[in-house]
Each structure stands twice: as C-alpha cells, then as structure tokens.
Amino acid sequence: MGRYFLSVVRRDLTLAARRRSDWLTALFFFVMVSSLFPLGVGPEPELLKRIGPGVLWVAATLASLLSLSRLFEDDHRDGSLEQMVLSPASTVLLVLGKAMAHWLVYGIPLLLMAPVLGIQFNLSWDAIAVLVFSLLLGTPILSLLGAAGAALTLGLRGGGVLLTLLILPLYVPALIFGAGAVDGVMAGTGAEANLSLLGAFLLVSFLVAPWIAAASLRVSLE
Amino acid sequence: MNFYHYASPTTFYRLAGKAIPWAAWTAGILAVLGLYIGFFVAPTDFQQGEAYRIIFIHVPAAWMGMLIYLVMAFWGAIGLAFNARLPFMLMRALAPTGAILTFVALWTGAVWGKPMWGAWWVWDARLTSTLILLFLYIGTLALWSAIEDVKRSDRAGALLTLIGVVNVPIILFSVVWWNTLHQGSTVGVSHAPKMAATMLQGLLLMTAAAWLYAIAATLVRVRRIILERERKTEWVRELLEKET
C-alpha cells in the first residue's frame, strides 16, 4: 500500500523533473500576479501591507488551479491513467499520491517564493513567517480539493476554466483562514485560531476529497 | 402502496403530471394571500418603514435557495448509492430553480440594502455566503452542460454537489468568522426587532408558496427531462401518438 503510494509520487516527481517549464510557469504566474497588484492599486507601503496577505493567498490559489487542470490530463491522453485505475491497487491511493506530488512540485515552490513577495508587500518578519506557515497548511488543501475537480473535468473541452468555476468556491475557507492568520498576526490578535481552523479544514479535505476524486475518476473514465 | 412503484421514470411521469396542477395552483393562491397580508395587512415596521416588506419575497427565496442545494445533494447521493436514473433527473430539475431563487434572494437583498444600509452591496456574512452558494450552483450547471454523455454528467454533478455540501457549513462558518474579524461596524440583521404576528403569517404563507412553486417547477422540468431521455422507448411513442 505504502509502496504503491510512494511509487505514484516518485513517478510524478520524475515526470515533473523532466519538464521543468511546467512548474516554473506556475511559479512565475504566482510572482507576476502578485506583482501586478501594486501596479494596480498604487505603491503606498501601508496599503500594500494591508492587502498583501490576501493578494498572496489569492495568487496562490490561482497558481495552483492553473497547474491542477493538467493533473490527470497527460496520463489520460496516453492511456496510462486508465491502466492505473483498472489495476487492483486502490484508486484513492493513486489520487492521494498524485495530489501529494502536485503539492511537492507546485506548493513547495510557492512557499519558498512567498517570503520574497512578502517583502515586496512590506510585511513584517512575523507576518511573513505566519504567511509561509499558513501556505504550508493551506496549499495541500488546494491540491486535494483541486484533484477532485481535475478528476471531474477530465478530458472536457475548456476543462481548465471549468475547473476554476467548480473549485474556487470550495477554496473560500482556505483563503479566509490563511489570509486571516496573517492579518491576525499583524493586528496583534494572534494567528493560532485561524491556523487551527486551517489545519482542521486540511483534515476534512484529506478525509473527503480523495474518495470523491477517486469516484470521479472512475465516472470520467467509463 | 409500493413506494418503489414511482421510482421508474414511466410511472413518475404520470404522477408528476397529476401533482403539478395541485402544487402550482396552491402555490399561486398562497402567494396571493401571503402578498396581500404582506403588503396590505402587516403593520409598517417602526424602524425600517415600508421597505422591510421585501422580506416576504427575500426570506422565502433565500431559504429555498439553501434548501434546494441540500435536496440536490440528497438525490445525488441516492442516485449514486442505488444506481438509479430518476434521482439524477430530479437533481437536474432542481438546480435551475435553486439558482434562480438564490439569485432572487441576492437581488431583493440588494434592493432592501439600498434604503436600509445605504449601499446596494455590503460584505455581510449572509450576503457573501449566499453569493458563494450561487457560485456553487453555477459551477454545477456549468459542469452538467460541459459533459455530453448523460451518465457521466449525472454522476459528475452528483459528486460535485456532495463535495459542495460537505463544504457548505465550513464556508458558512468561515464567512461569518471572516466578517466578524474584518468588519466591526456592519449593520446586522441578526438583532432585528420581534415580528408582529401578521408579519409572521405573511412570511409563513410565502414560504409555503415558495416550497410549492419549487416543487411545481421541478416537476415540470423533470417531466421534460424524462421525455427527452426516454424518447426512444415505447411508452413515450404511445404517449406522443395519443396527444397528437
């Protein structure tokens, strides 16, 4: 069981390592979207500090969605996905492995880039630390829920935009708790409450999303 | 009476045909009564003046908008669990009514908010969560229309609604939490004054009317869906021959 999971993760990581442009695109999308906001709203440090956490979180959700539309697509096109679903190994584990690999490839770079963007938005070091921690808890949620959406829209025309429409409303709690944690630190009320809620939401997503995604994969491949 | 008798589209088609006039007429009569009480009998509110009367449309629409999503999830789960066709058809028939009522709730809320709060839109917790509910409806409708294969699109919609329904309480809670954190000075509706008895009567009548309207609209729509999907069967051909 564990070996199957690990081999799915290792396979996706190898594929990602051979196609670096994929995850670099998502990362630079994150950087560029966040950098557009100061150009749009003006460079006042106080204003940027105020909107920074929210902007970075919204940009992170969009960047993760951008990459999620391809989560199953390539394997679907060459037929390997069908074989993996047909195999006796659990589809839930397959989905979990793919979501895990997606998080490692797309989530971790966001975490590493977030402090740099935080400095651009004039956030304090405390706020940046909480921002990174909230992304650490929050980006797996994006990968898990997004995997369900990607399974539902597999192979559809305009699947990417459709995926956004389906999944963005479900991201709302992660966005609120994540950006709220950073706001809490900056306002002096502490981040613990929001971070705990974010962790709870991660657990719920972990318990629900892989099963729905596995069922969706089976429906989509029929 | 065997309940499962009506689980087949053929028999349900006839049952729905008989039930529609009842539901529609009762909805109409209740709505007329409710609106009469709401607009002519119920006293003017001492704080909100005449503008409060929009709640007779707003509140039932908002309630039904939320309820219909739950009912959709219920039918979706039944359809997936028992691998039946009719629940999915019901689910599809419910969604447009739910989306329309949610939209009506948002719209009437905006119209009410303008004189009360001085703004068409405020990021109040209820408004925001209703907006997200509308997004969930739109997502489901978009998914359905994107998938051509009926079987796949039915199941995909059911799964999406299931994940949505797990999320709805979390979204609701998170929005309330977000609202209390970000906005200290919003005018809340939660501390509204106690209602006069006639107001409550009007509201209950309108709520019953909204229920029956939703049932009638859903049944009309489900009959169309049944005809469309069963168009190649013998009984539909006989039915059409009889009618033409």
Image (cartoon, rainbow, N blue to C red):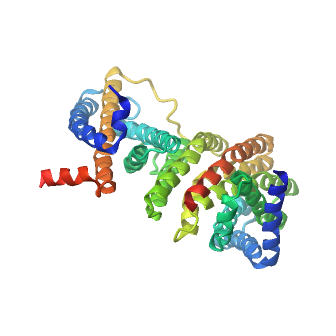
Q: Quadrant of the N terminus of chain B?
A: top left
Q: Is residue A192 left or right of residue B71?
A: right
Q: Position of residue A97 (x, y in %)?
A: 77, 57
Q: Position of residue A192 (x, y in %)?
A: 81, 41
Count of numbered tags: 0
x, y percent for residue B150: 43, 58
Considering the image in quadrants, where does the C terminus of chain B appear?
bottom left
Residue A15 image point, x, y percent = 78, 73
Q: Is residue B40 visible?
A: yes
Examine the rendering and report whether any part of residue A42 can be seen.
no
Left/right placement of residue B21 relative to residue B82 reads left
Which quadrant holds residue A104?
Answer: bottom right
Residue shown at the point (24%, 40%) measured from the top left? B14
On screen, residue B2 versus residue A197, left or right, reads left
**Above or below A30: residue B102:** above
Seen in the image, is A129 located left or right of residue A177?
A: right
Q: Is residue B26 above or below residue A134?
A: above
The one nearer the camera, A161 or A210, is A210
Image point (29%, 44%), residue name: B10
